[in-house]
């Protein structure tokens, strides 16, 4: 090309959750059936949408107005409905004008980071959901600035480390938190959230809270919405219907803006996001029209509670199946529908393998694992796909130096899920204790897994 046309941050855009499907398709083409536990789509994993919800959407689909543009910020009646629900939290009062709809939270994330000044950084958790870390790094054209989540403390943030990294990185202008968390399934107590707000207030930062899983909390855990603890700190909450209803194909999410009037720079920043939506015209109309009717339906709460109970049961099955594996750190999942396993430090090495029966698949996996710079946990994931036909996501792809993987609790068949957990436990044990490991590394003492509370 005559000129350089690639954005300086283009190299930071990566989404391993779907990238790994390229490997899966090659393995499937070689005759191996693969169980997909990489993507958080409840519908794709067989979750049934109740008939009453389909009836609401069907009736709306028969209305001509469902096919028209809506206001750039979103339908007024839906924004008023959501603002009223938020205002029951006891936090800052918001109106419909403080709510902006997007074509899914992916669209919202792109706008929220994309319209920041390139030198203004948002510190993100580590590990964190790839879309956030990639979008933030891409906007700055630099690697993410992050704060650690501690697998030995229920994946809660290391608040002292967060404060120090904010203090000594003057470019940090905002803090991201994901609660309940993706990929770890952690649910943050109100005290943790208040400490994050206090740090933001001390250093005059704003907060972004991804709360897409806010109403999927279980195991007797409780949390607070950002709006209930934010006080006078400027902030943005990201919400949507893709996980909760669930309706991921709707591509319908929104942000709620808190305390924009408290800081003129923040107010101007929010205005730039609104102007971007005006240029885009609007977001999807039909799902916006459906939101109030679905959330107010008399069967909605019992439907959601049934889903929570099932995730709670499956989280217990996963924890009990995996906690005894030597060399890993595992926690109970208390929210969302993911489990993250971390390998103990130095337990992975390039000599470890799983036995792969299919010779062509074995050759493919070995070629992939020979690539320069191959992350150790990604190597395990490739062997797991080839040997056990089980696809999970390497933890290193979630902006962290920790080695491990994430899988979902979305399988509908409990017997199949139990067998999957048995396969996963056996595969980890065999991989960590393979002949290659014993000949290359000294035997280590047993390492205890960390229990969730």
Image: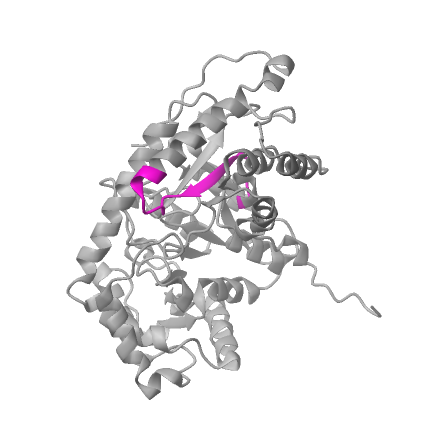
Q: Which one is nearer the viewer's eye here, 419 or 43?
A: 419
- In this view, which residue lies farthest toward the left? 298
Image vertical order of residue 119 relative to residue 366, above or below = below
Q: Position of residue 432 (x, y in %)?
A: 53, 22
Q: Quadrant of residue 91?
A: bottom left
Q: Which residues are magenta?
A: 398-416
Q: Is residue 245 magenta?
A: no
Q: Residue at x 51, y 54 (%)?
A: 132
Q: Residue at x 29, y 51 (%)?
A: 216
Q: Would you identify the image quadrant in which residue 416 lies?
A: top left
- Residue at image point 30% right, 83% down: 62
- Where, quadrant-wise, is the C terminus in this rendering? top left
Q: Position of residue 189 (x, y in %)?
A: 30, 43
- Location of the N terminus by quadrant is bottom right
Q: How is the image coloured?
A: one colour
Mark yes or no: residue 380 visible. Answer: yes
- Whether residue 409 is in magenta: the answer is yes
Give above or below for 217 relative to 276. Answer: above
The foreground one among 74 and 145 is 74
Q: Is residue 154 visible?
A: no
Q: Nearer the viewer, residue 105 or 423?
A: 423
Which residue, as the protein is rendered here, is positioned at the far bottom?
A: 64
The picture places residue 87, in percent across and down from the top left corner, at 24, 65
Asked which quadrant contains residue 98, the reply is bottom left
């Amino acid at each position: 090309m005559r000129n350089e046309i690639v954005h300086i941050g283009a190299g930071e855009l990566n989404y391993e959750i779907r990238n790994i499907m390229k490997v899966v398709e090659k393995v499937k083409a070689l005759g191996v059936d693969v169980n997909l536990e990489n993507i958080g789509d409840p519908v794709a994993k067989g979750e049934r949408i109740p008939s009453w919800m389909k009836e609401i959407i069907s009736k709306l689909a028969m209305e001509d107005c469902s096919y028209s543009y809506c206001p750039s910020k979103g339908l007024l009646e839906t924004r008023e409905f959501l603002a009223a629900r938020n205002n029951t939290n006891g936090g800052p009062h918001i109106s419909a004008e403080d709510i902006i709809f997007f074509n899914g939270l992916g669209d919202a994330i792109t706008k929220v980071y994309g319209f920041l000044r390139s030198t203004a950084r948002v510190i993100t958790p580590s590990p964190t959901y790839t879309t956030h870390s990639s979008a933030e790094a891409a906007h700055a054209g630099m690697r993410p600035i992050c704060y650690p989540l501690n697998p030995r403390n229920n994946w809660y943030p290391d608040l002292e480390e967060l404060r120090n990294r904010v203090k000594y990185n003057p470019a940090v202008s905002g803090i991201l938190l994901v609660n309940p968390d993706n990929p770890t399934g952690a649910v943050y107590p109100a005290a943790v959230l208040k400490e994050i707000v206090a740090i933001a207030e001390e250093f005059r930062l704003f907060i972004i809270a991804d709360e897409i899983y806010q109403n999927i909390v279980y195991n007797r855990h409780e949390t607070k919405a950002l709006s209930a603890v934010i006080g006078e700190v400027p902030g943005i909450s990201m919400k949507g219907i893709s996980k909760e209803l669930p309706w991921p194909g709707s591509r319908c999410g929104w942000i709620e803006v808190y305390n924009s009037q408290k800081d003129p720079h923040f107010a101007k920043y929010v205005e730039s996001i609104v102007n971007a939506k005006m240029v885009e015209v609007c977001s999807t109309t039909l799902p916006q029209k459906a939101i109030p009717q679905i959330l107010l339906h008399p069967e909605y709460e019992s439907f959601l509670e049934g889903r929570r109970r099932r995730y709670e049961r499956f989280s217990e099955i996963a924890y009990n199946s995996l906690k005894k594996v030597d060399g890993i750190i595992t926690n109970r999942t208390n929210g969302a529908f993911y489990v993250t396993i971390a390998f103990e430090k130095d337990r992975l090495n390039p000599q470890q393998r799983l036995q792969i029966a299919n010779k062509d698949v074995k050759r493919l996996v070995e070629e992939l694992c020979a690539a320069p710079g191959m992350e150790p946990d990604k190597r395990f994931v490739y062997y797991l796909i080839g040997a056990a036909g089980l696809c999970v996501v390497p933890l290193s792809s979630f902006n962290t130096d920790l080695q491990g993987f994430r899988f979902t609790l979305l399988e509908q068949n409990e017997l199949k899920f139990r067998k999957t957990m048995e396969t996963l436990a056996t595969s980890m044990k065999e991989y960590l204790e393979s002949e290659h490991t014993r000949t290359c590394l000294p035997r280590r003492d047993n390492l205890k897994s960390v229990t969730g509370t």
